[in-house]
Image: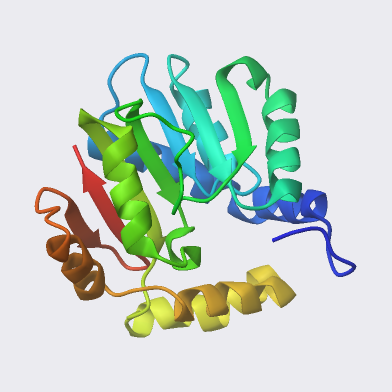
C-alpha cells in the first residue's frame, strides 16, 4: 500500500493501531510463547506495514532488535516514524525491499524471522520461504501468521458481521485479504515440496501459523 487520495499511510497506521492494537499485542505474545526467542535475538520482520507488530514485540522484549523489510516506501517512512515515537529508533531498522529477493542480506544473519498478515501478498511464496531459510541461522526460529482462506461458520461470522461493524469500509480489505490467503494443506504442500519438513503449520479460528522453534 502507498499514499493515495483515498487514504494516506499515516491515516492507515492510525486506524490499524486503533482497531488492532490488542491484536498486535497478541501477535507479540504468540511469538514469545510459540517460539521463545533467545536473549538478544536479531529479528527480521517481512512486510511490517506501519510497524506495529514488531514494535509490540520489542516493547515486550527489551533485549530484541528488529529489521523490517517492506515493499512500500510510504509504509517504511511511517514505520520509522512510529518506532521513533515509541522510543525504539535505536533498536529498529526499516527499509524498502521484498521477501522474494533479500540478496542484500547475508546468510545466517537472523535469530528469528517473523511476519504478520503479509504472506497473502507474497507474489512467489516459495521464493520467500527459501530466502527466509537462507537468512535465518541454522538454529534460528521462524513465526509467520496470516489469514486462512477456509474459515468455518464462526470465522465467517466474525468477518462478515463483527468485521463490518468494527472496521466499516476497511472491512473490504480484510475480506479481500482472506480471499487471497491459503489453507493449511496448501502451505504444507509448498513447504514439503521444498524439503522444509521441520516447519510446523497449524491453524486457529482465523489464522494459519507457520513456525520453526
Residue at the (60%, 27%) spot, across then down: 93
Residue at the (13%, 63%) spot, across then down: 192
Q: How is the image coloured?
A: rainbow
Residue at the (80%, 49%) spot, across then down: 10
Residue 88, position as x, y percentages in the image: 63, 21
Residue 207, position as x, y percentages in the image: 36, 64
Residue 58, position as x, y percentages in the image: 50, 26
Residue 130, position as x, y percentages in the image: 29, 50
Give the side of residue 94 with respect to residue 179, left or right: right
Return the residue nearer the eye: 28 or 93: 93
Determine which quarter of the picture holds residue 50.
Answer: top right
Vertical position of residue 97 compared to residue 87: above or below = below
What residue occupies the far right of the structure in this picture?
Answer: 5
Determine which quarter of the picture holds residue 146.
Answer: bottom left
Residue at the (44%, 32%) spot, across then down: 105
Q: Which part of the image, by quadrant, shows the N terminus?
A: bottom right
Q: Which part of the image, by quadrant, shows the C terminus?
A: top left
Return the residue nearer the eye: 68 or 12: 68
Amino acid at each position: 500500500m502507498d499514499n493515495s487520495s483515498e487514504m494516506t499511510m499515516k491515516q492507515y497506521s492510525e486506524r490499524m493501531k486503533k482497531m488492532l492494537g490488542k491484536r498486535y499485542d497478541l501477535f507479540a505474545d504468540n511469538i514469545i510463547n510459540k517460539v521463545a526467542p533467545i536473549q538478544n535475538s536479531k529479528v527480521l520482520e517481512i512486510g511490517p506495514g506501519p510497524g506495529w507488530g514488531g514494535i509490540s514485540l520489542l516493547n515486550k522484549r527489551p533485549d530484541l532488535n528488529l529489521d523490517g523489510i517492506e515493499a512500500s516506501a510510504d509504509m517504511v517512512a511511517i514505520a520509522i516514524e512510529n518506532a521513533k515515537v515509541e522510543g525504539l529508533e535505536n533498536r529498529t531498522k526499516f527499509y524498502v525491499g521484498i521477501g522474494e529477493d533479500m540478496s542484500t542480506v547475508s546468510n545466517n544473519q537472523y535469530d528469528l524471522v517473523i511476519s504478520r498478515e503479509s504472506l497473502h501478498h507474497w507474489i512467489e511464496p516459495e521464493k520467500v520461504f527459501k530466502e527466509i531459510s537462507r537468512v535465518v541461522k541454522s538454529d534460528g526460529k521462524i513465526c509467520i501468521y496470516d489469514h486462512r482462506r477456509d474459515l468455518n461458520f464462526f470465522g465467517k461470522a466474525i468477518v462478515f458481521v463483527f468485521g463490518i461493524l468494527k472496521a466499516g469500509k476497511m472491512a473490504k480489505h480484510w475480506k479481500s485479504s482472506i480471499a487471497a490467503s491459503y489453507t493449511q494443506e496448501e502451505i504444507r504442500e509448498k513447504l514439503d515440496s521444498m524439503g522444509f519438513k521441520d516447519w510446523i503449520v497449524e491453524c486457529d479460528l482465523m489464522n494459519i501459523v507457520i513456525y520453526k522453534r
